[in-house]
Image (cartoon, grey):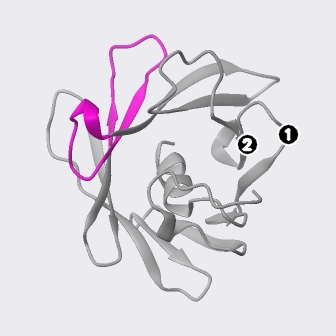
Amino acid sequence: MEYPFPVIDLSYCAPHTINLQIKTDKGATYDGNGVRRFHIKSPRVTLHDRCVLCDAGGNSILTLYWKIMTMHRRCQVFMGESNDSSRLLFSVKKAELLQSGVMRLEVFLAYNKKESECDFRVDVVSGKRSCHVYAGESPTVVASMQNNGGFNVIVYRNVDYAFIVALLALF
């Protein structure tokens, strides 16, 4: 992206490409230097599945809530540990199964109430071998992930990497 596009916070938009590695066994995300950037706080028992993404200092950045009983298994993401609608950042819904084994997720930012077009989309290859995050319906890739013994993520310049980590935490 030409200009920074913060979804979570401008401080997570770097003017250069960011390389991250997500280690699911530790529930943590590390940068290219091995420094822990984020981790998932263990969920409590609730009516909806939920998890909290924390920064390296243990501060809650956002909470992901999955609505189990919806047709598209929608997820809503809120700032901090809230589920107050005024703190909604974005929502994600499972859209359709594309060509053999590719699942599409559609991402709608909080201000996109009509949801006639998604703000971002994620195409996930079966078995979670790889995925690409696109800006809306455009061919512009803003991040990509390869699973080759670990989830290696490339977040392109000016893209909110906390937002990308939150998207990837969904699957």
Q: Is residue 164 above or below residue 102?
A: below
Binning the other alpha carbons within 10 Å of mark 2 as few (below 14), some (14 to 19) or many (20 upward) gives many
Residue at x 76% of width, y 30% of height: 137
Binning the other alpha carbons within 10 Å of mark 1 as few (below 14), some (14 to 19) or many (20 upward) gives few
Q: Which quadrant would the N terminus be assigned to in this image?
A: bottom right
Tag shown at residue 120 = none
Describe the element under mark 1 as helix, strand or loop. loop
Q: Is residue 118 magenta?
A: no
Q: Is residue 67 magenta?
A: yes
Q: Quadrant of residue 97?
A: top right
Name the foreground residue: 162 vs 5.
5
Tag shown at residue 134 = 2
Q: Is residue 78 above or below residue 91?
A: below
- Give the image location of residue 113, x and y in percent: 47, 20
- Give the image location of residue 152, x and y in percent: 66, 66
Q: Dot 1 corresponds to which residue?
A: 139
Q: Amino acid at mark 2?
A: Tyr
Q: Quadrant of residue 39?
A: bottom left
Q: Which residues are magenta?
A: 64-87
Q: Is residue 134 above or below residue 150?
A: above
Q: Do labels 1 and 2 touch, CB within 8 Å?
A: yes
